Every structure is written in structure tokens, then in C-alpha cells.
Amino acid sequence: MRKKTEKKAFSFFLMPGKSVVRKDLEDVISRIVSGLKVWGERRAEFTEIPFSFGETEHPDLLMGVPKALGNPEAGLSSVSKAVDTVVILPGENAAWDRDLAAVLKNPSLNVLAIVRANRILGSNGTTDPEEWLMLEEVIKDSVRKWLRRSGLKKEEDISKAVNWKASLSEDAGEQGYTSLFADPSTRRMAREVKEAILTLKDDAKAVEESRKPVPLSVSADGRKEVFSCMEGRENWPSEKRRIPAILLLGESGTGKTLLARWIGSALLPGEGTFTRVNISAMQKSLIDGELFGAVQGAYTDLTHDTPGLFLSNVGKTVFLDEIGDMDSACQTRLLTFLDDGLVSPMGWHGKPFSAPLIIVAATNRPVREWIASGNPSFREDLFYRFDCVISLPPLRERRKDMRLLVSLSLQEEEVNPGYLEGNGIRRISLDAIEALEKMDFPGNFRELRIKLKRACSAARREGGTTLSLRHLFYE
């Protein structure tokens, strides 16, 4: 590198070869730079930055073909710090030769990308979208590094409005299930959910038609009596049916409850048609009575008939959360219920009652692994009673959704108080976004929201409106 120039602009140093014309490279870079500048406020950090092409002692981004980059006369061996470099392969089938190997081994070159010339300098203006976007991303990141290094911009200046990915309307609900469908695991889950809804659509219609309130009478001494009023009542419109059931599997915080509500509203829409119960929060000795009901005196202190969850929600959706914590005896009762849709309350000696409804169950336990290994914690025959089993991916498998989830979460009142009224945190720095993308979230989406909520509180305590990297690590 020959002459030293004063650093007043972001500098590109181009080293084309015989088959790569310098002017063509300059045109490509100019198109990318122009594209960065036209996005206005959302990419404000690019709008006033000067760019230069020239030979400088310390370029900000070096681009060239392997033969030129490996030329000792280029003076790269004298550079004390590795230069960000993009390697341009000169042909469609350019060989992985000694020149390229020498570039990759050179400690003075920090190779960020390898692109093929004909893919970014295509004839008739055609380009390969993947390689073009890769080159654009490298230039973007290099410019931002230069802005920080040069002191022209502070962290807060290189930021985005919190709704940069998508705007959350005021009447929207929680966004845990939202996805860009860019990750294979999310696309698979979405397909499984839709297939489950289509599979159970006819069953759901029959369940809805059977909806009836639980009858109740009061005896002379004031005791509530349920089951004597229900004798002879048939809820199913025709013959007995199996209970339509869906099982959701996924780690804690992956959005099982949100998805269960979504499925419930898709199959049985309307207010009051979804009931959730957490099995792990119930006393094990009382689960049977809570689900299937019990007659007065069936256990100590029970002074009246209680219909239980299933009979109380005929024609509706019941969500059994943490079903993996259900003991074996109750699992046996549940699988029988899924088979015939009949409920026999504790202490009841008459004919069982039909209770048509939809069951959505969920667990964070590894039930597939338990069944495969013969672990008796979850009955294999119960597992196979479910019509559909859907696995929810953890956040580590939804990396391409991370920016969308961050953007939408920061627009929720619970996470970012005051945002909907025009207050709260309005922007998030790129450093903070990139840090969030690299973090592990064992608690998945729930943990991400808590992290953002605490960071927003830290930023507000400083009196700022931009969430920065330091706010993510405040205790």
C-alpha cells in the first residue's frame, strides 16, 4: 500500500485482476452504498458518510482477486492489524488454488466473505441475491465498525426504532408465536399446527354442537346436587366419540400456552371457550376429583357434588398444562376418557356421563425420550391417544426470528411501559441487537422478554429513550 492519506472517509482499497474490471467493482460498491443511504431514518447512520476509493496505508475494506491480494508487492505484510477483506473469485468455476489458500492463511487479511465476480457483476444487471446480500452485509458491518472507531457516532447513534422489523397494533395480543418462518423448525411447527386444525375440524364442530350448561339443583338442606340432575342426559349428538386431543411438546418458555390458546380459538372460537389448568400446581391426591368430579362425601370435607373440569367445560377446549407431571393412575383415567369421552366422578355408581370437549395438553418433559427408553413416567399408550403431537422449537433454533421477536416485544406495554403512549424506550442500539442475537436463552421467549423488560427499566432510570448494550447487563 503506497501512500498515506488522512482518514476523512470510509476507504475502499480495490485490487482487481485481469478478468475483474476496477470500474465494475466501483459500480457495485456505489450501488450498495446508495442503497444503504436511501432508507432514511431507519438507516440514518449511513446518510452523511463520505466514501472513497483509493490506495491508502490503512484501508477500511480491502477487495480483490486472490492473485492480487497475495502479491508481496502489495505491502500487506507490513500491516500491523488485519485488514477486513472481501475475496473476489474471478470466474464461475474459479479453482480453490494456491493463491486463494495463501490469502486465507495471510494473518494480515481478515477475510469476511468470498464472492464470485460473475455473481455480483452479472451481465445485463443480473446478480445472485445471496452473494449480493452477503457483500452488502459485509460493507454495512465494516462501515459501522468504522463509525465507532472514528468516534463519529456513539452507540446510541447507531440504533433502530423499536418497530424497525414490524409495527405491533394496539389491539394485538402477545406475540410469542409470531415468526418470519425463516427457520426450518418454525416452518415445520406451523405446518403441523395447520394440519392438526384441519384434521380435527369436523370433530370440533360436533363438540361445539354438544355444548350444554351443567345442570344444578339444591337439596332441602342447601347441598348442591349435580349428578342426579345429569342422569339420562346425552351430550354427544349421536353415538359416543373419541375425544379430539393435541399434545404440545417444548421447553419452558417456548410459547406452549400461547399456541394452545391459538389452537383453541381456531377450533372453537368465542369468549369463554378455553380453560387452562396446571397439573403440576394441583395436589396429586385431588387431581382425579378436579378433572373428573366427585360426589359429596367422596373425600374428606367434600360437602356437595362437584362436576370437575371436564363436565364443566362440555363443548369447549380444556388445556392441560404440564401433563408430564401427572401420576400414572390419573394418566390411566385420562387415556380411558380420551377413548370413550365418558366421565365417572369419584364416588358415583351410576351410568357415566358423556363430556365431549377438545383436549390440548402440553409438557416440557422429554416424553418422547421417556417412551423410547421405557421410562414409565409417561404412559406410552396415553401418548398414542393424542391425534396430533406438535413440537415447539426452542429460541436457539429460531435465530432468524430473533430480531422480529425483539422488535415486537419492545412494543408491548408489559415489557416497555409507556411505549403505546409515545413514551418509554423508542430505540435500540445495533450493539444491543447483535448481543441479544448471540445470547443463550435457556428460558426461551419468556426469558428474552424478562431480559428486555429489565433493560428498558435500566435505560429509563438513566433518563434515556435508547436501549443500549450496557442496559442488558444491569442487575
Image (cartoon, grey):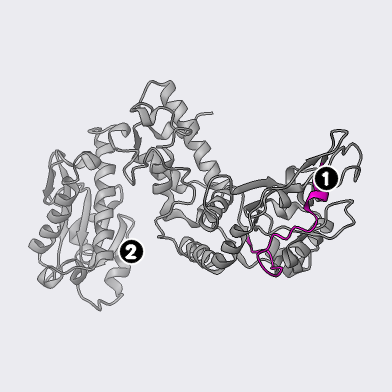
Instruction: First in sequence, mark 1 or 2: give its number.
Output: 2
Q: Is residue 263 above or below residue 428?
A: below
Q: Residue at x 25, y 39 (%)?
A: 147
Q: Residue at x 42, y 27 (%)?
A: 459
Pick the front one: 453 or 191? 191
Question: In this picture, which residue range is highlighted in magenta?
Answer: 225-246
Magenta-colored segment: predominant secondary structure: loop
Percent of width and height locating residue 79: 26, 50
- Closest to the camera, between mark 1 and mark 2, is 1
Is 229 one of the magenta-colored residues? yes
Question: Do the CB atoms of the residues marked 1 and 2 lie less than 8 Å apart?
Answer: no
Instruction: Find residue 104 and name its label.
Output: 2
Q: Residue at x 92, y 39 (%)?
A: 300
What amino acid type is highlighted by mark number 1?
A: Leu
Q: Residue furthest left?
A: 23
Pick the front one: 81 or 60? 60
Q: Residues within 10 Å of mark 1 (few under 14, many from 20)?
A: few
What amino acid type is highlighted by mark number 2?
A: Leu
Percent of width and height locating residue 411: 40, 37
Instruction: Find residue 349 and name its label.
Output: none
**Could you say whether the residue bearing mark 2 is in a helix, strand or loop?**
helix
The quadrant of the picture occupied by the C terminus is: top right
Q: Residue furthest front?
A: 220
Residue picked out by circle 1: 286
Is 194 one of the magenta-colored residues? no
**Could you say whether the residue bearing mark 1 is in a helix, strand or loop?**
helix
Q: Is residue 259 visible in the rendered structure shown here?
A: yes
Pick the front one: 156 or 246? 246
